[in-house]
Image (cartoon, rainbow, N blue to C red):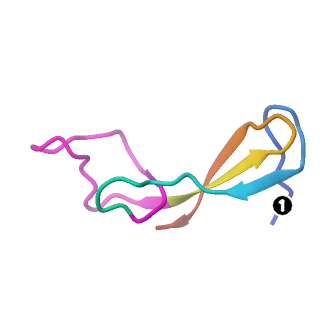
Amino acid sequence: MSILRCTHCGEQALETGFIMDSGQSSQGYVRWVQGALERGVFGGAKLFGRPKWQVEAFRCRRCHHLELFARQPG
């Protein structure tokens, strides 16, 4: 894995973490979904058949900026 740098200040000391999804029926983490948001009849997002990727989050120890990456299907 390459060294991750903060895009805000250039620091290399990024701390691993995650963005928690605590909504109803959540899996505990957020996902990136390909394409524009489309809502169904009841207002929820249409997700069927769309690629989804688990989001990894890193926080810069110097300036506290968050970096988000979609690295693995989820």
Q: Residue at x 50, y 67 (%)?
A: 73
Q: Is residue 51 left or right of residue 70?
A: left
Q: Nearer the viewer, residue 23 or 11?
A: 23
- Which quadrant holds residue 61? top right
Q: Is residue 40 left or right of residue 62?
A: left
Residue 7: x and y, percent? Answer: 79, 37
- Which quadrant holds residue 60? top right
The residue pinned by badge 1 equals 2
Residue 3: x and y, percent? Answer: 86, 57
**Tally of numbered tags:** 1
Q: Quadrant location of the N terminus? A: bottom right
Label 1: element kind: loop
Q: Nearer the viewer, residue 62 or 47?
A: 62
Residue 14: x and y, percent? Answer: 81, 51
Q: Residue at x 51, y 54 (%)?
A: 20
Q: Residue at x 69, y 44 (%)?
A: 67
Residue 62: x and y, percent? Answer: 87, 39
Q: Residue at x 84, y 46 (%)?
A: 5
Residue flagged by tag 1: what amino acid is it? Ser
Query: Is 28 colored magenta in this rendering?
Result: yes
Query: Is 34 colored magenta in this rendering?
Result: yes
Q: Nearer the viewer, residue 22 or 52?
A: 22
Main SS category, magenta section: loop
The stretch in magenta equals 27-53
Count neighbours of disc 1 (C-alpha within 10 A) and say few if under 14, some if 14 to 19, many if 20 or more. Answer: few
